[in-house]
Image (cartoon, rainbow, N blue to C red):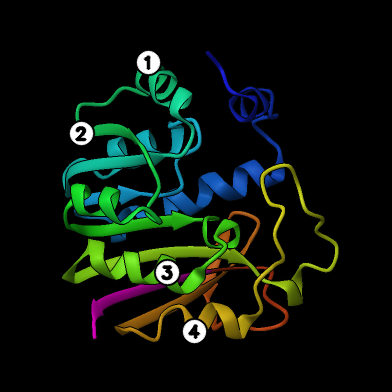
Amino acid sequence: MTTVKQALMEKIDPMNGRHLEHIARYQFAVPFVKGRVLDLSCCNGYESKLLAKAGKKAISEIIAVVTDKEAVAYAENVCYHPLLSFRHGSITDDNYVSELGKFDTIVGFDTIRETEDRSNFMEQIHRLLTPEGTVLLSASLNGGNAGRKNTVFNQRPLLTPEQFRFLFVGFQETAFYGQTGVLFEPSKPAPDIEICIGIGTGIR
């Protein structure tokens, strides 16, 4: 059974700007992804499969978290890859997090905005990462997004640059990139940045 969100995704024009931005973030992530990988940004599975295919030499396994139970069978059917598996659940669930184990890389594009308790979200990220692990997160920042309206996929308020920077205080090394369309350049979270990607490595 196809969920409403999957149906909407399937109808998106491949040249839709927002869609291209999302795919570009996964392409950007490939050089940083290695070992056992957790993808928290899984929608219908296509992006997780992109990571598996492009990073197969460095990746040992990808687990893609699917919050919609019906979407698991859909993703397994449409986006099969030998390195990739899909699991229904939420990392806000302590038992679920315990069952997942540890990961060398966690990808969470466009997920933090949909999280009610960001502190708990980052605590779970720390629980899931190996001591030297890496997390990649992205967020639309309110300073540079005056013209962007909430969508069916994003109903919560945008993050401020300060809120986004604060997510990474628990990491030894950090790097930030601004995204414009499908292009990226090093840039700290700032009011004029529309979309920011943060990378944290090594838990303090």
Residue name at image x 39 percent, y 26 percent:
72
Asked if the residue at tag 1 contacts the one at tag 4, i.e. Cβ–Cβ closer than 8 Å, the answer is no
Q: Earlier in the sequence, mark 3 or mark 1?
A: 1
- At mark 4, the secondary structure is helix
Closer to the eye: label 2 or 3: 3
**Residue assigned mark 1:** 77
Residue kind at label 2, given as amino acid type: Leu
Q: Earlier in the sequence, mark 4 or mark 1?
A: 1
**In the rendering, which numbered label is found on residue 125?**
none
Residue kind at label 4, given as amino acid type: Phe
Residue stretch in magenta: 197-204
Distance of label 4 from label 1 (alpha carbons)? 38 Å
Distance of label 4 from label 3 (alpha carbons)? 13 Å
| Quarter of the figure with residue 137 | bottom left
Considering only vertical position in the picture, is 140 above or below 88? Answer: below
Considering only vertical position in the picture, is 197 above or below 176? Answer: above
Q: Position of residue 55 (x, y in %)?
A: 26, 45
**Residue assigned mark 2:** 83
Closer to the eye: label 4 or 3: 3
Query: Left or right: where does residue 178 sit relative to residue 74?
Result: right
Residue kind at label 1, given as amino acid type: Asn
Q: Earlier in the sequence, mark 4 or mark 2?
A: 2
**In the rendering, which numbered label is found on residue 120?**
3
Residue name at image x 47 percent, y 77 percent:
176
Q: Is residue 138 magenta?
A: no
**Residue assigned mark 4:** 166
Q: Nearer the viewer, residue 164 or 67?
A: 67
Q: Earlier in the sequence, mark 4 or mark 3?
A: 3
- At mark 1, the secondary structure is helix
